Image (spheres, helix red, strand yellow):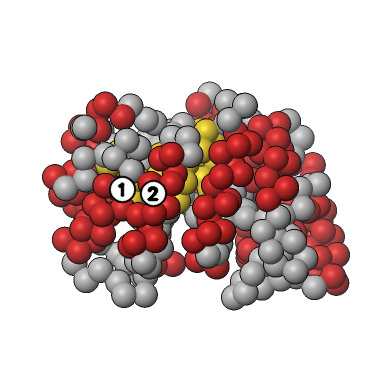
Amino acid sequence: MNTTQLGIKLKGLVAATHTPFTQDGQLNLGVIEKQAEYLLSNGVNAVFVGGSTGESHSLTVDERLALVNRWSEVVRSTHQQLIVHVGTNCLSDAKVMAAHAQSSGAIAISALAPSYFKPKSMDALIACCAEIAGSAPGLPFYFYDIPVLTGVSFSMPDFLALAPKRISNLVGLKFTNPDLMAYQKCLRVANGHYDIPWGVDEYLLAALACGAVGGVGSSYNFAAPIYHRLIRAFEAGDMESARMEQYRSVQLIDLLAKYGYMGAAKTLMGFLGVDVGQPRLPNNSLAELEQHQLRADLEQIGFFDWLQP
């Protein structure tokens, strides 16, 4: 199989979904249908399940498989597309999850680099990815580059040039890295052959200007209208409006980060009627007083008004 046969391009917004938990920290799979409905109602037609936003490293393998099973059931009767993140420190576990994703109706898989024992060379990184991708040979594979969390930082243009020799189903990168110079190089490898969805929400406008056509991000769960307007304004050449929407994104993400991004983002989902619970340690949860203050701060910047179509 070569990548041209796989024919995939992630366009527009792909939400990196939260993993829902009960009050005692167990999986709450019953919420997933509401998550999917909320995203569809906001024009988000693809989900990236089990990634950083999904707290994948805080889940057991069995929990990750159960999460994918439920998402697969929910999206089956809709036009929503499922991309599954399968990366973990144990390659055997990643291979099990990759094969499971292929049998569950996912349209693609992705994996970040092992981050405890880190690959020390490009060759080692490619070898890791080849083992994972080879366990789901019928699915497109995206390497998930997020050096701020993995501590693994190699040239992604070089990766795209070298990896296809060993990864026949490689279609691109989930590029969660603010390096716009490297991003532009990636977009031009092999005459633009690879799909490079952008992964830094607060820089989306800059990425669009460089040639991005899609993005995978956490804030698309709760702020999709902002980004839809941003994309429409950019496509219409209305840069003033596009910059205004991007700055709204900046204000929102900056505010959530002050409370601890994961806990604040999951609290915000609850404000919108989609109760995904609080995160597991080591991510922090928001106390009741903090939740009230967060809502007040969101109202002060005008966030709830920004959600109007």
Residue 283: x %, y % from top left: 61, 71
Left or right placement of residue 191 versus residue 149 in this view: left
Q: In the structure shown, which secondary structural element does the residue marked by tag 2 occupy?
A: helix
Q: Which residue is mark 1?
A: 135
For the point 66% across and 38% down, the residue is 36
User: Which of the two discs, 2 and 1, labels the residue nearer the N terminus?
Assistant: 2
Could you tell me the amino acid type at mark 2?
Ala
Residue 147: x %, y % from top left: 37, 64
Nearer-the-camera pick, 241 or 101: 101
- Which quadrant of the figure has residue 291? bottom right
Could you tell me the amino acid type at mark 1?
Ser
Nearer-the-camera pick, 137 or 35: 137
Left or right placement of residue 269 versus residue 11 in this view: right
Q: How many residues crowd around disc 2 within 10 Å: few (fewer than 14), some, or many (20 or more)?
A: many
Residue 277 in sight: yes
Quarter of the N terminus within the rendering: top left
Residue 302 in sight: no
For the point 33% across and 43% down, the residue is 136
Marks 2 and 1, Cα distance to the nearest angstrom?
6 Å
For the point 43% across and 39% down, the residue is 103
Residue 214: x %, y % from top left: 46, 36
Residue 158: x %, y % from top left: 19, 52
Q: Which residue is mark 2?
A: 98
Q: How many residues crowd around disc 1 within 10 Å: few (fewer than 14), some, or many (20 or more)?
A: some
Vertical arrangement, residue 32 with respect to residue 283, above or below: above
The reply to whether discs 2 and 1 touch (Cβ–Cβ < 8 Å) is yes
